Image (cartoon, rainbow, N blue to C red):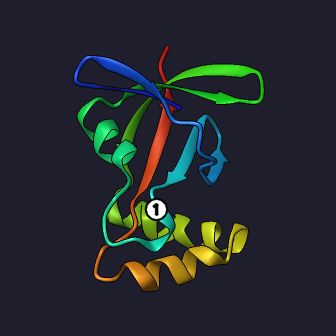
Amino acid sequence: MTYTTNEQQFLAEAGIGRLATGDTIAIVASKAGQPTHPAWYHNLKANPHTTIQIGADHHPVTAREATDAERTLLWPEFVAFFPSYDFYQRNASPRIIPILLLTPRR
């Protein structure tokens, strides 16, 4: 994922758990259950236009945080995909681990 902060571009190469629903990709800002959000979360909130890479393909997307209702539907899917997310959420409490939705920019 490429994101911008302070007019500089950075490439985040960390593996980020993702789920795809149609054209939308959901990602989790877990930071392995730490008490704070990862830096890339804050950067995407400030500058939601980014580029992601899946395999060899690059996709320009716009990020937004999932609503409470969307998170309620998506969180169990993330836990089923990677059960440690459940531990991360318990460990991160009271922080709610956010889910961001990435939609294509055309």
On screen, 70 above or below 18? below
Q: Quadrant of residue 93?
A: bottom left
Residue at figure coordinates x 77%, y 22% from the top left = 56
The x and y percentages for residue 100 are 43, 49
Residue at figure coordinates x 53%, y 32% from the top left = 1
On screen, 98 above or below 16? below
Q: From this viewpoint, which residue is outermost toward the right?
A: 55
In screen coordinates, is 23 left or right of 93? Answer: right
The x and y percentages for residue 105 are 47, 19
* Residue type indicated by callout 1: Lys
Q: Quadrant of residue 13?
A: top right
On screen, 100 above or below 87? above
Q: How many marks?
A: 1
Q: Quadrant of residue 68?
A: bottom left
Q: Residue tagged by mark 1?
A: 31
On screen, 5 above or below 35? above
Specify few, some or many for label 1: CA neighbours under 10 Å numbering under 14, 14-19, or 20 or more: some
In the image, 106 versus 4, the foreground residue is 4
Residue at figure coordinates x 34%, y 59% from the top left = 37
In screen coordinates, is 16 left or right of 40? Answer: right
Q: From this viewpoint, which residue is outermost toward the top?
A: 106
The x and y percentages for residue 78 are 62, 66
The x and y percentages for residue 73 are 52, 68
In the image, 6 versus 76, the foreground residue is 6
SS at badge 1: helix
